[in-house]
Image (cartoon, rainbow, N blue to C red):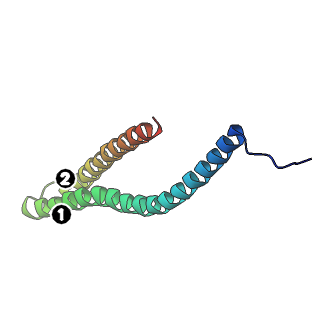
Amino acid sequence: MNDHRTPSSKSKTLLAEQIGAKAARKLKARQSTQGIWFGLGMMGLIGWSVVVPTLLGAALGVWLDKHYPGGRSWTLGLLVAGLALGCLNAWFWVAKEEKTMRVESQERHE
């Protein structure tokens, strides 16, 4: 008896799916290393979007305290206002980026 069989279309499909899954894992691994650097860059960008308004508010507050002294501290008030503005800015920016990434992910899976 000859036990040499030709592969069926079902086994060919299974093999193609396995190869496709391996290729997808390799691509995902390659993209995840790029994603790490992208994530670190985003953290830096978000940090600066909070720090810059905070420092500008503090600097303007110091200038106002020197030129217009009074009972209230302009420095403290504008520091808090700059921090709040920076946090709002970062929040809106991250929400926008997250929405963009979600839309791109859905388009990729369709």
- Residue lying at 37% horizontally and 58% vertically, measured from the top left: 42
What is the quadrant of residue 95 in the picture?
top left
Q: Classify mark 1: helix, strand or loop.
A: helix
Mark 1 nearby-residue class (10 Å; few <14, some 14–19, many ≥20) = some
Where's residue 31, x and y in %? Answer: 47, 58
Locate residue 35, reporting x and y percent: 45, 58
Residue 62, located in which quarter of the rendered image?
bottom left
Closer to us: 36 or 94:
36
In the picture shown, does residue 54 fall above or below 11? below
What residue do we see at 40% from left, 60% from top? 38
Residue lying furthest right: 1
Mark nearest the camera among 2 and 1 is 1
Three-letter amino acid code at disc 2? Arg
Q: Which mark is residue 59?
A: 1
Q: Residue furthest top?
A: 110
User: What residue is shown with label 2?
Assistant: 72
Count residues near mark 2 (Cα–Cα under 10 Å), then give few for <14, some for 14-19, many for 20+.
few
Label 1 amino acid?
Ala
Query: Can you say whether 73 is above or below 16 in the image?
Result: below
Q: Quadrant of the C terminus?
A: top left
State the residue lying farthest toward the left. Answer: 67
Compare marks 2 and 1 and give the one earlier in the sequence. Answer: 1
Residue 106 on image: x %, y %: 43, 37
Q: Nearest the camera: 108 or 68? A: 108
For the point 24% across and 60% down, the residue is 52
Secondary structure, mark 2, is loop
The quadrant where residue 45 appears: bottom left
Residue 70 pos. (x, y %): 13, 55
In the drawing, does residue 30 fall left or right of residue 49? right
Above-or-below relation of 96 to 27: above
Distance from Cα at disc 2 to Cα at disc 1: 16 Å
